[in-house]
Amino acid sequence: MSAESTSTQAEPPAGIGGAATKSQVIAWGLWDWGSAAFNAVILTFVFSVYLTDAVGDDLPGSISATTWLSWALGIAGFFIAILAPITGQRFDASGKRKLSLAILTGITVLSMAGLYLVEDNYRYLWLGLVLLAIGSVIFELAGVPYNAMMRQVSTPENLGRVSGFGWAMGYFGGIVLLLLCYFGFIVGDGDTRGFLGLTTDGGMNIRMVALLAAVWFAVFAIPVFFKVPELPSPAVDPGASKAGFLDSYRVLWRDLRELWNVDRRTIWYLIANALFRDGLAGVFTFGAVLAVNVYGISAADVLLFGVAANVISAIGALVAGRFDDRIGPKQVITVSLASMIVVGAILIAVSGPVMFWIFGLALCLFVGPAQSSARTFLARITPPGREGQMFGLYATTGRAVSFLAPTLFGLFAWLFGADRAGIIGLLVVLGVGLAALSMVKAPEGDSALPVNP
């Protein structure tokens, strides 16, 4: 791809930047709604806790189940980082984004269903870790063609609203499923739990949660495969469709060099994006810890705060989507990050559950907009036909700096001898990301639009 061919493209590839029906947008958003089953239930709130607190509770040896889990997810992150860009590149070149999404979603669902076999016995910990790691890798890879399809269900005029709708669907889907799992399978004491009265013997109630999550994801993923059409191969990346595994990296390096020569903004944005997204992830990662250990919220109320936080983030994403389309994604991200830094600074100074509810939720109000507009920014500056490759790099760069927020949180907590001080580390990451973003030129529009020679 030369600079000349990029600047003089008269027509976008078929299906890029064209109008989409409301049913296609809803079908696309339902995948996000269903995918919350993996993120919220399996990886964050339910099954990972079951693995460390129940299955691996009596694990022999000096290495804890939590440590093994962190190592397993670390290995998964490594594979995501090295595989995401070339798989996205191949999805683009082959013109099989939807087929790829279907296969990867199916494998993720199977890995989730397989967790039903993980009984409450440390001998099953390894099976649980392997399935969780495989699911993490495949789920992240599935996000590449899914995000790349965003242009297929939007126009340059409503891209922000469509992205915000998808994020909100993910938040709300997680809330509904978590509540179903909690009241149906988890709440209560004794040998049976939830209003379904499932036995806790062998971890049966939590294993049934894994099955429910798998079915949930499978059912809500189906509409996108019927409603959103497959795109033909754009034929804008010579050699990518025929390249082998190692050759795919040569094609990727060639494309990055050409992109650097044509529009360095994309490279700089991926770097800035990786920084502030790690700060956003840190807010959710350490929110529950801070709520209990610093602000005195009871462990029982943390789930309620989590539900409220997801509702607020979803509303923020929906509202900000309209501003994204009007004033651009950079302005939305900038305002969101700056607001988070201000609110975070206030959180450092206040104490007590009431203050955490007020300012913690205020913080979450800006998380959804930043996440949603981060996606639309990249979509607007990505060369047509390269969406999969760019969102593959989006996943990779995010993994490359994912150590920053946890490391700085721990560093400041250690330096000041208080968990509260860890908030400073999160604010530093957000601030550095905001500073890096300020040096990236805002999108003029959508690069899928025809450009006059």
Image: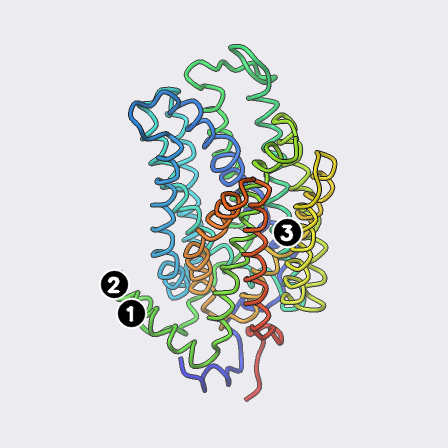
Q: Residue furthest top?
A: 191
Where is residue 287 drawn, in percent x and y?
59, 40
On the question of residue 218 being in view, the answer is no
Task: Verify CB contact (< 8 Å) between mark 2 and mark 1.
Answer: yes
Query: Is 361 positioned to the left or the right of 373 in the image?
Result: right
Q: Residue furthest front?
A: 416
Where is residue 127 drawn, in percent x and y?
32, 30
Task: Verify CB contact (< 8 Å) between mark 3 and mark 1.
Answer: no
Quarter that holds the N terminus? bottom left
Residue 246, numbered circle: 2
What residue did someone put label 3 on?
368
Whole-Å distance between the Cαs marked 2 and 3? 37 Å
Residue 176 lies, with reference to residue 315, above or below; the image says above
Dot 1 lies on which element?
helix
Residue 441 lies, with reference to residue 79, above or below; the image says below
Q: Answer few, some or many: residues within 10 Å of disc 2's Cα (few below 14, many 20 plus, some between 14 and 19).
A: few
Q: Of marks 2 and 3, which one's residue comes earlier in the chain? A: 2
Q: Answer few, some or many: residues within 10 Å of disc 1's Cα (few below 14, many 20 plus, some between 14 and 19).
A: some
Front disc: 2 or 3: 3
Front disc: 3 or 1: 3
Whole-Å distance between the Cαs marked 2 and 1? 7 Å
Dot 3 lies on which element?
helix
Amino acid type at mark 3: Gly
Residue 131 lies, with reference to residue 382, above or below; the image says above
Q: Residue furthest bottom?
A: 453
What residue do we see at 38% from left, 36% from top? 69
Where is residue 23 drawn, in percent x and y?
63, 52
What residue do we see at 68% from left, 65% from top? 325
Amino acid type at mark 1: Arg
Amino acid type at mark 2: Leu
Quarter that holds the C terminus? bottom right
What residue did someone put label 1 on?
250
